[in-house]
Amino acid sequence: MGEIAIIGGGPSGAVCGAELARAGHSVNIYDENLAWEKPCGGGLTYKATEHFPFLLDNPHPKKLIRDVEIISAENQRAKLDLSHPIVIYSRRVLNGFLLDRAREAGCGVHHRRVQTIDISAEKPRYSLDGEWQQADFVVVASGARNQILPGTRPLSADELEMTQGYFVPQTAEKIIIKFLPHFEGYIWSFPRADHISLGICGSMSAHTSNELRTHLYAFVEEAKFSTENAKFYSHVLPSPQERTLSCRPVIGKNWAMCGDAAAWVDPLTGEGLFYAMRSGEILGQSIAEGRPELYPQRVRASFSLELEFAARIVRRFYRGSFLGCSVTTRMVQFLQRNAVFRQLMSDLFCGTQDYSSLKNRVLGHLGGTLSQFVSSVLNIEPPARKLRPTAPAGD
Ligand SMILES: Cc1cc2nc3c(=O)[nH]c(=O)nc-3n(C[C@H](O)[C@H](O)[C@H](O)COP(=O)(O)OP(=O)(O)OC[C@H]3O[C@@H](n4cnc5c(N)ncnc54)[C@H](O)[C@@H]3O)c2cc1C
């Protein structure tokens, strides 16, 4: 059995480590922060809880939310009632819980920073405080911010989102999503067990940090959140393009990347926790079987085609228009008035509807203008009926 070093003990590294240790490998996980409040909403959808039921079935503090309010750039409001709750964790709790599972499986978990990795020799090496250590395989699970493997292509500014936010010391019972005029991103409020993670994400190539801050402050004022004693945060989030998802190498001779380091994030929603955990799991299983080369194709079969779909429509979603109004505003208007569309969005939001099968559902069940609207966002042909576009249809 081999010696595996995992750099990063976030969700991807911790899940990967647990898989490998259970299969009998000697695994060391290094994290410079361990269980920390990594800037994040902390929301996990049904996709995640269905595949990893332990995310629900544990005694750790978490919040289960079914009510979502979606607000357009013009402050029109719509409500969603989710059939499956979004489970929201503080990242300190979630990371700690996943690292405990990795320890229980047999991993060594170390509070250390890895400076660099060298993959030029027969076996990979990594440096801890200037001292080189050797392993049989190195897993890079160090998140979006760190580029510690020389020779891999870093994500460019047009494939990163900037995020800013607050951990607000108050509680709430609904998720809020707010869109902004001519803005590639959104504001969110995610209630957790004992605070709210409130923040904004926006394309790094399209918006400045000042722009983000201004929008965030305006929302905080308008929605009457108190930021007194609230901790401010900022971080980056991968927003990969299709070519990156399909072509960027995530594995080499004796190394592989998972989670944010591999850019496995939904570029439309910013959802990354499930993909971090799932990619860590698939990588761990592939290495344990002695077939690490199967990792990319297994990820493709599992979820990366979904992310590629999202990458193809993200610009139309945030920048596109339909009948003279932005797509996001039209979306809120349809949500206000059409129960079938509400159900569809609710299923997308909680993760029971994937992007790939959306086309069939749209063509089969949505009528008239609504079908044209969704088809225009998805860039598919609407049903071949004579349709005369008008304003959003009623129920
Ligand atoms: C503001 C924000 C909000 C988000 N909200 C959501 C959400 O609600 N739902 C969702 O699904 N996703 C969300 N995401 C995405 C989600 O946070 C990430 O996809 C997820 O954390 C990726 O997990 P990971 O294990 O790959 O990386 P990370 O969680 O970033 O973990 C990487 C770990 O590596 C460690 N590390 C880095 N470099 C080194 C080094 N050199 N040596 C040792 N340790 C190192 C770090 O300390 C860190 O613990 C959000 C992201 C942001 C920025």
Image (cartoon, rainbow, N blue to C red):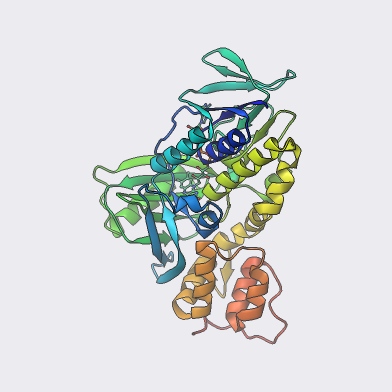
Residue 262 in view in this figure: yes
For this rendering, which residue is in front, 131 or 110?
110
Task: In the rendered view, tell whether residue 80 sits above or below residue 268.
Answer: below
- Residue 328 position, x and y percent, is 51, 66
Which residue is drawn at the image coordinates 43% and 42% (left, top)?
39
Along the line of sight, which residue is nearer the eye, 258 or 3? 3
**In this view, which residue lies farthest toward the top?**
131
Q: Judge from the rendering whether residue 259 lies leftward or rightward of residue 302; answer left or right.
A: left
Q: Quadrant of residue 85?
A: bottom left
Q: Which quadrant does the N terminus fall into? A: top right
Vertical position of residue 175 compared to residue 62: above or below = below
Q: Is residue 299 left or right of residue 352?
A: right
- Give residue 323's position: percent from left, percent from top: 57, 75
Instruction: Tell me residue 306's x, y (percent).
Output: 65, 57
Which residue is drawn at the image coordinates 34% and 56% (left, top)? 219
Query: In front: 87, or 378?
Result: 87
Vertical side of 320 occupied by 6: above or below: above
Residue situated in front as seen by the camera: 163 or 280 = 280
Quarter of the figure with residue 77: bottom left
Q: Residue at x 25, y 51 (%)?
A: 226
Q: Is residue 22 left or right of residue 75?
A: right
Q: Position of residue 130 (x, y in %)?
A: 55, 12
